Amino acid sequence: MAADPVPTDADARAAEAERSVGVLFGTRLVGMPFTHLAHVAHPSPHFVGGSWNYWWQAHYLDAIVDAGLRLLRSGDHRGALEHAGLGNRLVATIRVRNVGRFTNRYYDDMAWLALAIDRLRLLTGRLPGARSRRRLRVADRALTARLRSAMTGDLGGGLYWNTARDFKNVPATGPAALHLARSGDLDTARLLVDWVYARLLANDTGLFLDGIRLTAGGEQVVTDVYTYNQGTMLGALLTLGDDTSLERAGRVVNAVATHLTAPQADRRPLLTHGGDDGGLFTGILVRYLALAANHRSLDGEARSTARRLVLDTGDGFWLGRDERTLPDGRWAGVFSPDAALPAAERQPPGQTIELSTQLQAWMTLEGAATLVV
């Protein structure tokens, strides 16, 4: 009989990032039993009357699934099952905190939660003892229906950002395309991807711009370039998986390596976008670069480049972390918002620590742990 897989150093790093995020942010909703959410900052504000940050919770769920899949790879079925249960409690608590709904006004928020639930369903499907599958199906149906409602012919296609319906952008269109592709609706996913290529690809860099706003004067292209937009488009292309999509995916990886890195003497970490919402952006990109690095149908050079970007960014976060003792005597590793600079400089003691930046590092280290040798 073959021996159980041995956890790797990359696994240990990811596990430590998970533990630190749990120490700093894990909580119950106003103390209610059988609930779970993440505070959005440490020291933590109270949820009631405070910032909700629905989409941060979606990425927290995604990271919990990452950890469950990591444990499953290492042969720890019980640990994976515990993570599936924690993820299901989080989904249920999101609904409670969101006034009894899975949906909200922002289509990008809903796309992120749909993607995380996709992956939680994947994890629970591999665990015979997992429960709450019905809740996940209900959430998936509600979210998918709302995402489809935001797809119109205005501006030639794409997805609206929110219910104001005056802005179509990649932050909503990219993850929605990925969700639909994973759900098997390849034709609709491909239409969304083609719209982004037609309207929001910067031909000089090969990177995706942010979106198109409808104004009184007509269309206004928002030319900001964010790391996460490259990530979700990369994920959608890899999931579509046809020759054209894989060729495009290789070009995205190369464009990211060329234009969105901070070269150093010994590594080439990805650029980041500071704190608040931007604190999540590069972690999202790394999630899909890790998929690219493990995608055996992708061009070998692109896979190698993606692998190096994930590992260099993960090394930057890990080596720059700062271990701190909390007032209650526990300790936690605190990560920098910037993989190119240490936490002692970018996240000094006494400064509020945001969930987004710590999730970004955890997501990156989970991505690194998936890379095949």
Image (cartoon, rainbow, N blue to C red):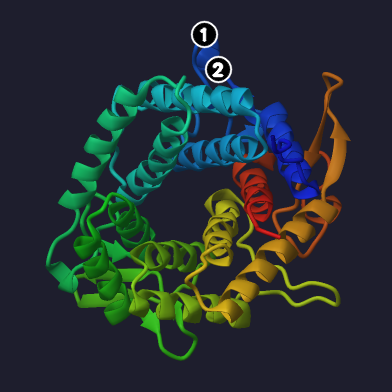
* Quadrant where the N terminus is found in the figure: top right
Q: Height in image: 23 above or below 303?
A: above
Residue picked out by circle 1: 33
Q: Are the two marked residues, 2 and 1, in contact with CB atoms closer than 8 angstroms?
A: yes
Helix or strand or loop: what does disc 1 sit on? loop
What quarter of the picture does the C terminus occupy?
bottom right
Residue 116 higher or lower than 340, as above or below: above
Task: Report the residue at 64% width, 35% height from top.
Answer: 71
Judge left or right: residue 292 versus residue 117. Answer: right
> Splitting the image into 4 quarters, where does residue 293 fall?
bottom right
Who comes first in sequence, dot 2 or dot 1?
A: 2
x then y, percent, for residue 249: 45, 74
Taking the view exactly as shown, the residue that stands out farthest to the front is 1
Mark 2 neighbour class, 10 Å CA radius: few under 14, some 14 to 19, many 20 or more? some
Determine which residue is flagged by label 2: 28
The number of numbered badges drawn on the structure is 2
**138 relative to 275, above or below:** above
**Residue drawn at (31%, 61%), measured in percent from left and top?**
173
Residue 60: x and y in percent read 54, 38
Q: Viewer-proximal residue, 106 or 293?
A: 293
Which sits in the foreground, 141 or 47?
Answer: 141
Disc 2 and disc 1: Cα gap in Å?
7 Å
Q: Nearer the viewer, residue 307 or 228?
A: 307
Residue at 57% from the left image edge and 49% from the top image edge: 276
Left or right? Give the position of 281 relative to 102.
right
Q: Position of residue 25 (x, y in %)?
A: 64, 30
Please state which amino acid type lies under the numbered disc 1. Answer: Pro
Q: Farthest residue to the left: give it.
A: 153
Give the percent coordinates (x, y) of residue 273: 60, 62
